[in-house]
Amino acid sequence: MKRLDPENVHNALTIDVEDWYHVSNYEAKPVLPPESRRVRQNVERILAILAEYHIKATFFMLGSVAEEEPTLAGDIVRDGHEIASHGYSHTLVPRLGPNNFRDEIRRTAEVIGRQTGCKPVGFRAPQWSIGPGISWAVDILQEEGYLYDSSYNPLPFVGDRKGPRTPFAIATTGAVLSRCRPW
């Protein structure tokens, strides 16, 4: 296989760090023994592939996964990738409402910050569930220090079909995006 020259490749690669049971239509989180969880081994495989090809990505991590796998967020950041928030429980944003949404993103930022020394500046809602009519969520993200949201993507069944193909900047003018904000 021919190795790609990373200086000539201009893509955005994002990965949601969640396990199979985090899908939004699964009402109750199953009680599973640690050996049945697959998120760590899958992320480790992805990290190895990315390292082989000198590719960096943004990993949108659930706070609950960070708590279950307390060294995984640090592994991601140590390899030079961006760590961003995917919420805590993988509950759709409209179901959370403003107060629970704020609690979830704060909890996730605290867990990731403690584990990596970095406060996440990016956010992606579970199942891209921020869209038209949920502007309150963007306001909360901005109040909590997030610089961009990756939930408005124009995907066929989720997100905002009229949304931009690029991350939605929610930062004030002049803010600089960085992969890590010290906690």
Image (cartoon, rainbow, N blue to C red):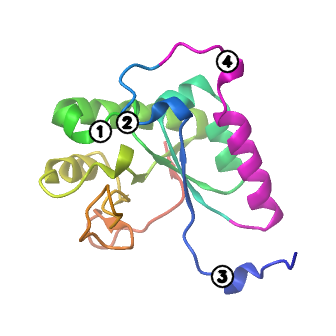
- Dot 1 or dot 2: first in sequence order is 2
Residue beneath label 2, please? 24
Give the spatial CA distance, label 4 vs label 3.
Answer: 38 Å
State the image quarter where residue 163 is shown: bottom left
Give the spatial CA distance, label 1 vs label 4.
Answer: 25 Å
Give the spatial CA distance, label 3 vs label 1.
Answer: 33 Å
Q: Which amino acid does label 3 sit on?
A: Val
Residue beneath label 4, please? 34
- Dot 4 or dot 3: first in sequence order is 3
Residue 46 lies in the magenta stretch: yes
Mark 4: few, some, or many residues within 10 Å (few <14, many ≥20)? few
Give the spatial CA distance, label 2 vs label 4.
Answer: 21 Å
Q: Quadrant of the N terminus?
A: bottom right
State the image quarter where residue 14 is shown: bottom right
Give the spatial CA distance, label 3 vs label 2.
Answer: 33 Å
Q: Do the residues labelled 3 and 2 touch (CB within 8 Å)?
A: no
Secondary structure beneath disc 4? Answer: helix
Give the spatial CA distance, label 1 vs label 2.
Answer: 7 Å
Residue beneath label 3, please? 9
Q: Do the residues labelled 4 and 3 touch (CB within 8 Å)?
A: no
Task: Tell which tag, 3 or 1, sits nearer the viewer.
Answer: 1
- Dot 3 or dot 2: first in sequence order is 3
Q: Which residue is drawn at 32% across and 66% down?
A: 168
Residue 92's tag is 1
* Percent coordinates x, y for residue 115 in the rendering: 59, 33
Q: Is residue 64 above or below residue 154?
A: above
Magenta part of the protein: which range?
Answer: 30-55
